[in-house]
Image (spheres, grey):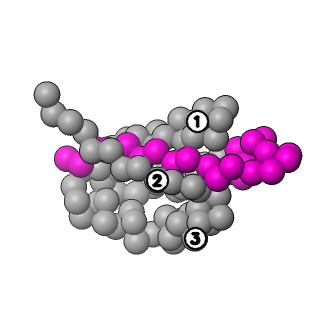
Amino acid sequence: MIEFSVILYSLPKHPPPLLISMRIGIKALTVLVKARRDEAGAIMYDLHSSSDGMFVITEKWASQNALDAHEATTHFVDFQEKAGSLVEKVLRLPLVSV
């Protein structure tokens, strides 16, 4: 099983700042999250957001093959293209086993 979180930091915007950035970011991410529900091997794919433009996606996949297939889908590739104009930084945090 593959489990990790992705943290996306929105680009700082000039007025009208955050609200527009948040709406665009949430819309793009919502499409990605809803499409994921139909993918084989997707166990969990949750979206969290903060009022300061930070988004967290928590993902759990049955296998590396399922994750690779997800990252090759049209909705994932489309999001990656849109993210360039919306995202300042992306961090991928693997689950730490304790």
The quadrant where residue 54 appears: top right
Residue 18 placement (x, y as % from top left): 75, 42
Query: Local crowd at mark 3 within 10 Å, few (<14), some, or many (≥20)?
Result: few
Mark closer to the chain start, 2 or 1: 1
Q: Is residue 97 left or right of residue 4?
A: left
Q: Is residue 45 visible?
A: no
Q: Amino acid at mark 3?
A: Glu
Q: Which amino acid does the dot numbered 1 rest on?
A: Ser
**CA neighbours of label 1 inside 10 A, class few (<14), some (14 to 19), many (20+):** some
Q: Position of residue 23 (x, y in %)?
A: 74, 46
Q: Which residue is mark 3?
A: 81
Disc nearest the viewer among 2 and 1: 2
Q: Residue at x 27, y 44 (%)?
A: 94
The image shows residue 43, relative to residue 52, as above or below, that is below
The residue pinned by badge 1 equals 49
The reply to whether discs 2 and 1 touch (Cβ–Cβ < 8 Å) is no
Helix, strand or loop at label 1? It is strand
Q: Regarding mark 3 in the picture, which secondary structure is present there?
A: helix
Residue drawn at x 40%, y 71% is: 72
Which range of residues does the magenta coloring cover?
1-25
Q: Look at label 2 and name its amino acid.
A: Val
Cα separation, mark 1 vs mark 3, equals 20 Å
Name the mark on residue 90. Answer: 2
* Magenta stretch holds residue 20: yes
Give residue 82's mark. Answer: none
Q: Are marks 3 and 2 in contact (CB under 8 Å)?
A: no
